[in-house]
């Protein structure tokens, strides 16, 4: 299959609103793949090449000035081979080799193919072809039961390998995929609810637990060998010796645990999220210690627990990890759940998770067995600029720059506007069309990628919180910002202040 075919497919899938349509389009293409194309193609569809991070960012891509091919000749396997060469380049002269490899790849690609591949490499391909949709497409293309495909993907932790087994193997091959200590498992995900009361209404009697503002970890122990994986299944064992030591001290020889890690301040309160992530991502720093908390157990001493209800898993978790378990209660009482949520927020955590006691561990889908509840904050901010979109959003102004009022002049002119973040999330096609037309009327200047506008448009933005950042002049960045609505009834003078946003910083 040509890379162009995959690029066209992603645009098609992105333009479909119904899940069934996305699944059908993906399944049709999966059926046409050669056996050596399946793994790389699946990786490109979810913007996660099998080589992992290849050390290419937006800045590196933007410095290239290739003369793209006029006709499509670049195959999926060709791209896979080029990415292998990128990953293999090391030592003296490796920078030149990487630049030459990238340039050659860019010149063999058409402009449309290179746009697609660039978005894959920097993780900005947004088609709606998330793992859950792709798993259903694999099941449809192979004629295998969706439950069997999902289970194999969960236990293997490898979407591409699961696709190969489903599309080229037998049903028995799929069923033989099993849980293995030391091999990362796809994590179970949660849906959302506005309140603990609403969540309890969904799950019934539940384990209501603190939702920690940390990094998710999956820890495997086989004797003295302990391995720690991230949410994306990257092995980070060497970065977290304190977690390794904590799990080695537990009363079991073989374990698979699911949990979170975060750093604490001197008073035992959670440090800001970015402090935890800076420590979690560091190859060498040890000044800030990470403390693990576990909320699930998938295996203990040769006993698989993924098919057991949470009530059984929770009892085993209590026995094995003791005070390393995430705080929580078992209740069917909505007020008790609300109180625990208040306690969690008061302690500096994100909110609560509400988990049905009768549910097995099921990876990769946001079902109703796990429900997360955390407060959402909304603020009125001012649009300062917008960036031209790519892919399906090409020709529209998409990513908007957001400003808050500087009430005291702490960051510039008193009463002026200071940038605090960007977002493209929550923008429907209608909003994209509207803002492209509206911002053209307000344009003051532009660069190749960005249109700057008179600061007159107020937009209501929902966020989960803020964190310290040197990226924006206000010294903060918005966490999970998304557009709720444009507020044409408000003036820029009515916008919220950067001081109000900064007051949300922990500590």
Image: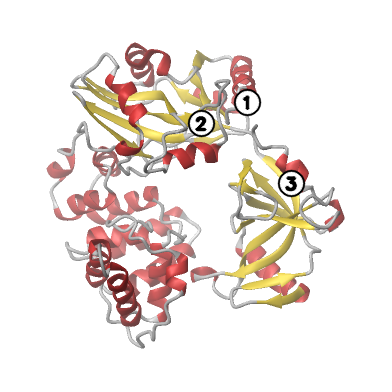
> Residue 393 appears in which quarter of the rendering?
bottom right
Disc marking residue 345: 1
Apparent side of residue 472 relative to residue 172 in the rendered image (left or right) = right
Residue 473 horizontal/vertical position (percent)? 68, 55
**Coloring scheme used:** secondary structure
Measure the alpha-carbon separation of dots 2 and 3.
Answer: 25 Å
Residue 230 horizontal/vertical position (percent)? 37, 40
Apparent side of residue 500 relative to residue 60 in the rendered image (left or right) = right
Measure the alpha-carbon separation of dots 1 and 2.
Answer: 17 Å
The residue mark sitting in front, 2 or 3, is 3
Residue at image position (45%, 75%) is 63
Disc marking residue 379: 3
Whether residue 122 is visible = yes
Report the front residue among 241 and 455: 241
Who comes first in sequence, dot 1 or dot 2?
A: 1
* Secondary structure of the residue carrying numbered label 3: strand
Who comes first in sequence, dot 2 or dot 3?
A: 2
Pointer 2 residue = 371
* Secondary structure of the residue carrying numbered label 1: helix
Who comes first in sequence, dot 3 or dot 1?
A: 1
Question: Image quadrant for the C terminus?
Answer: top right
Residue at image position (34%, 61%) is 44
Report the front residue among 42 and 259: 259
């Amino acid at each position: 299959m040509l890379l162009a075919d995959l690029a066209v497919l992603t645009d098609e899938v992105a333009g479909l609103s119904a899940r069934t349509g996305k699944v059908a389009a993906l399944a049709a293409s999966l059926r046409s793949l050669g056996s050596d194309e399946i793994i790389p193609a699946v990786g490109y569809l979810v913007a996660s090449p099998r080589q992992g991070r290849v050390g290419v960012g937006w800045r590196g891509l933007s410095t290239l000035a290739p003369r793209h091919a006029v006709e499509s000749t670049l195959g999926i396997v060709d791209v896979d081979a080029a990415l292998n060469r990128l990953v293999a380049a090391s030592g003296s002269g490796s920078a030149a080799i990487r630049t030459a490899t990238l340039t050659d790849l860019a010149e063999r690609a058409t402009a449309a193919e290179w746009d697609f591949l660039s978005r894959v490499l920097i993780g900005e391909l947004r088609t709606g072809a998330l793992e859950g949709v792709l798993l259903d497409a694999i099941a449809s293309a192979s004629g295998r039961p969706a439950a069997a495909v999902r289970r194999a993907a969960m236990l293997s932790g490898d979407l591409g390998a699961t696709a190969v087994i489903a599309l080229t193997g037998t049903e028995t091959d799929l069923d033989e995929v099993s849980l293995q200590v030391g091999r990362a498992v796809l994590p179970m995900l949660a849906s959302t609810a506005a309140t603990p009361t609403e969540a309890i209404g969904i799950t019934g009697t539940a384990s209501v637990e603190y939702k920690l503002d940390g990094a998710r970890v999956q820890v495997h122990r086989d004797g003295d060998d302990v391995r720690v994986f991230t949410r994306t299944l990257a092995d980070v064992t060497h970065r977290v010796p304190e977690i390794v030591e904590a799990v080695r001290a537990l009363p079991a020889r073989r374990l698979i645990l699911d949990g979170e890690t975060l750093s604490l301040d001197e008073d035992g309160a959670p440090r800001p999220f970015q402090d935890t992530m800076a420590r979690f991502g560091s190859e060498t720093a040890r000044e800030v210690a990470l403390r693990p908390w576990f909320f699930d157990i998938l295996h203990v001493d040769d006993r698989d627990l993924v098919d057991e209800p949470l009530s059984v898993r929770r009892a085993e978790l209590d026995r094995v990890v003791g005070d390393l378990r995430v705080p929580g209660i078992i209740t069917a009482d909505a007020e008790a759940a609300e109180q625990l949520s208040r306690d969690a927020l008061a302690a500096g955590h994100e909110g609560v998770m509400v988990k049905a006691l009768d549910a097995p561990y099921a990876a990769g889908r946001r079902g109703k067995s796990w429900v997360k509840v955390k407060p959402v904050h909304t603020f009125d901010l001012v649009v300062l600029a917008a960036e031209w979109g790519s892919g399906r959003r090409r020709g529209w102004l998409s990513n908007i720059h957001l400003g808050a009022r500087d009430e005291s002049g702490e960051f510039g002119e008193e009463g002026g506007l200071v940038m605090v973040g960007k977002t493209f999330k929550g923008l429907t096609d209608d909003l994209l069309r509207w803002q492209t037309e509206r911002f053209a009327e307000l344009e003051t200047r532009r660069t190749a990628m960005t249109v700057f506008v008179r600061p007159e448009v107020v937009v209501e933005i929902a966020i989960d919180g803020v964190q310290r950042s040197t990226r924006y002049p206000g010294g903060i960045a918005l966490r999970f910002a998304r557009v709720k609505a444009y507020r044409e009834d408000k003036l820029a003078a009515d916008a919220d202040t950067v001081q109000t946003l900064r007051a949300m910083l922990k500590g």
